[in-house]
Image: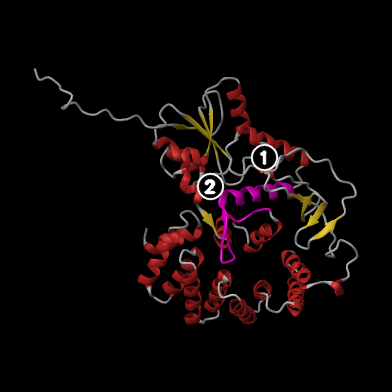
Amino acid sequence: MTETTADSAQPLESSPILQGERIAFTGTLASMTHRQAMELVEQHGGQASQHVSHQTTLLIVGEEGWPLEPDGRVSVKLDQARQLHDKGEPVRILSESEWLSLLNVEPQERKQQQLYTPAMLSQLLNISVHEIRRWERVGLIKPAKKVFRLPYFDFQEVTGARRLYELAQSGVKLEELASGLERLKAILPNIDRPLAQLEVLVRGRHLVYRDSAGLIEPSTGQRVFDFDPAPLPEVPSPADEPDTILMRPISSDPSPDGGSANRREWTAGDWFHEGCRLADDNEVDAAIEAFRLALIDDPLNPTHHFHLADVLYRQGHPDAAIERYYMTVELDHNFLEAWTQLGCLLDETGQIRAAQEAFRVALDLHPDYPDAHYHLAELLERTDRHEEAAAHWQSYLKFDQRGPWAEIARQRLGL
């Protein structure tokens, strides 16, 4: 009879990492659909469930936006899981990043470092670039970094801001929203940017800040009179971000000093902020006029030219917009977004060689600029320069793996 030695024995296979786990999901997942997540659970030996019950051992919280109901309260599944946990049931609550890290699918550190330009976010979240820029101007989102004026944003911060904004716009009562945020913070203390730092009042469709002196409408800098202020919930803010974002109606004819509107005394900055406000409200003709008035007093300001180019294009004047973008980069050669916008418009108007040059200038300034890689790859693809295009598609995929542009890049590369 042959003896079995340690050397001849077959190694034991390790158990699947999710074996014995019954897993449910709540909120919108940022990395995949719920169906794909359930398939991933089964691949790793677990059981996926649509509901939270006494059998649930793991609840995964999606990171696109926040798991809040339309009334501002914490999602039903999250509340149920917390109640079961408090009663001693063996249910754990993990964020999407923590779960993916557990499975070695997408390390949490990599996800936290993933940053997106306004154009990339526009594609990912179906939000216009104009809206993203407006949210940045009013402070609803803050860039993680800037490269030659180009902002890069954390995905979770933007999706959280969008959810918050949608709830506020839908008329959620302040008390319900504040209560939901506090509940969420208590359940998920490890969220990088808890919504508790944003204190929101639903008073209208415009955003204002509250500072130590009162309310300010950020696009104009005007003071807003707070005749009947609502009591604010005690929602703590980080010490380095003392200002609070609120929502409150403002006059349709604002003045910079908060008094009567005397436009004859407005500065270039006042007219610029008015142009931004009008552009946000889709009053494009009036915005064009406001930006032109800003340039009368400050003709060498590249930002004013950039915004004028944007509204000229929106109004159907691409040639005029091109000239303004050229003026922008003449005044500031390092204005990255102006170079890519210029390249896109030159391409659109059939000026292929000039468009290619604009994109290459942007990449000379910032070799890791995803938008420029994407647009240049598209241009090269259309002109049958497939090998050159492939290098830029591959470069783009280093910065984006899940958006619509990433899917196009993979298709072009045959992946």
* x and y percentages locating residue 301 in the rendered image: 68, 75
Q: What is the secondary structure assignment of the residue under circle 2?
A: loop
Amino acid, disc 2:
Ala
Name the front one of labels 2 and 1. 2
**Residue in the picture at 65% in, 61% down:** 133
Callout 1: helix, strand or loop? loop
Crowd around label 2: few <14 · some 14–19 · many ≥20 (10 Å): some
Which kind of residue does numbered mark 1 sit on? Glu
Q: Which residue is mark 1?
A: 69
Quadrant where the image shows the C terminus = bottom left
Give the extent of the magenta segment: 140-168
Is 63 inside the magenta-drawn segment? no
In the rendered structure, find residue 131 and report the number of the disc placed on it. none
The structure's colour scheme is: secondary structure
Foreground residue, 151 or 380? 151
Q: Residue at x 64, y 36 (%)?
A: 185
Q: Is residue 148 magenta?
A: yes
- Residue 111 placement (x, y as % from top left): 49, 48
Residue nearest the observer in this picture, 375 or 44: 375
The label shown at residue 30 is 2
Name the quadrant containing residue 398.
Answer: bottom left
In the picture, the quarter occupied by the N terminus is top left
Q: Position of residue 91 (x, y in %)?
A: 53, 26
In this view, 139 is above or below 391: above
Q: Residue at x 38, y 67 (%)?
A: 390
**Residue occupying the far left of the picture:** 1
The mark nearer the N terminus, 2 or 1, is 2
- Per the model, the C-alpha gap separating discs 2 and 1 is 17 Å
Residue 231 shown left or right of residue 29 in the figure: right
- How far across and how far down the image is residue 76, in percent? 64, 33
- Specify whether residue 182 is in view: yes
* Nearer to us in this view, 158 or 213: 213
